[in-house]
Amino acid sequence: MDREASTVKREAWRWNLSVFAAAFYLVLTAQPAQAFKILEPAEGAKLTSGSTVTARVDLGKDSGIVQVRYYWYGEQDDTLVGQEDATATGSIVAPVALIGLSDHDPAFGGPLRVPKDGIGPMRLLAVADISRGRLGTRSVFDEILVNVEPAASLGIIDFETDKPLHLGRTGQSSAFGHVDSMGKVFELPVVGEFTDGVTRRISTLGSGTRYQSSNPKIIQVLSNGLLQIVGNGKMTLTVTNRDKQALLDVTVDVNEEPNEPPVADAGPNQSVKAGTKVKLSGLKSRDAEGEALYYSWSQVRGSKIALLDVDNAEASFLAPTVSEKRTYRFKLRVTDKKGADSVPAFVDVTVEP
């Protein structure tokens, strides 16, 4: 009897333990995520340009959210402004694509239109506005990267430039910002006309475009798809995307003074606390000829913040309030006095609560 009673007690203890574990698991899984997060569309999703998808977010532990604003950006677009009027004009990278409210289905989400001219990697930014009563509002955000592909096929490739293209003018001295010069790095503005009647920008590698130079001693194709002036003369650029190809004749006639392009250095990645004054340093950027540099900082990831001294070697901003870790990315380009540009450099700043 004692042995039987002991066995019964042991089995009962095991059963109670398993019930407790199951209940504990249910409690854990029933809890909302700790951070505000985009659930739909999913990170890395393949979307069709012009289609409508469902936007869904998990509010996490944030309370008092009054609305969620959604924005589309190209992968490398600067985050210039947050604009709620989709008809507004000016220096607007991304008009608001959707304002999600509490009575929407799903709450704070809803039907979200994928940009009809979208192509390649795109960022979806969701910004939740939180009411703090008399203290005003603050915001939290989440951001994902998706891949957008048109359902239509590519018809023709065209260039938003003069054809043929002439870079530089004989006898004109180089000046920052408006004269082509030896060593200058630039992006060729290329568009594709698709069979759905939509013209899409296809300058980047992410859109499927590849470049080939008939003479790399005049224009060199860099690994990121940017082009660089390295000599004078005539050459042809071949642009390929999908199964289409286009040619652009180019004449380069710039000051022959040798000039190596500068190198941008945006400094190491940082991790800071909310409320901290953050300094971005480009002081390690350099020019082979030792010339003074012109600096240009911009933000390319994260909810828009007020970035100060964007034309200086050191830019700064005040780390915003966050509920969970969030990463902000910044881009630096430097230009020397002869007009040669650097390849962009990037730095990530992770802000913690």
Image: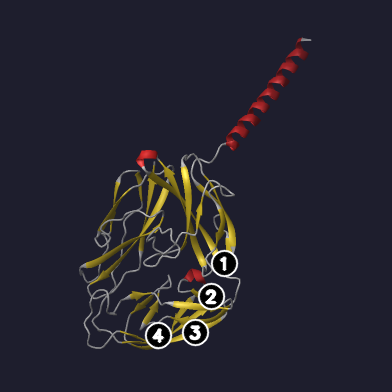
Q: Is residue 22 left or right of residue 353?
A: right
Quadrant showing the N terminus:
top right
Residue at (48% x, 71% y) in the render: 205
Q: Earlier in the sequence, mark 2 or mark 4?
A: 2
Q: Earlier in the sequence, mark 3 or mark 2?
A: 2
Q: Which mark is residue 198?
A: 2
Categorize mark 1 by other alpha carbons within 10 Å: few (<14), some (14-19), many (20+).
Answer: some
Per the image, label 4 sits on a secondary structure element best described as loop
Q: Earlier in the sequence, mark 4 or mark 1?
A: 1
Q: Which residue is mark 4?
A: 215
Q: Between marks 1 and 2, how big is the CA–CA gap?
A: 10 Å
Mark nearest the camera among 3 and 1 is 1
Mark nearest the camera among 3 and 4 is 3
Q: Earlier in the sequence, mark 1 or mark 2?
A: 1
Residue 23 to residue 291: above or below: above
Q: Earlier in the sequence, mark 3 or mark 4?
A: 4
Mark nearest the camera among 3 and 2 is 2
Q: Are marks 1 and 2 in contact (CB under 8 Å)?
A: yes
**Residue 40 visible at all:** no
Total numbered labels: 4
Residue at (22% x, 87% y) in the render: 171
The residue most toward the top is 1
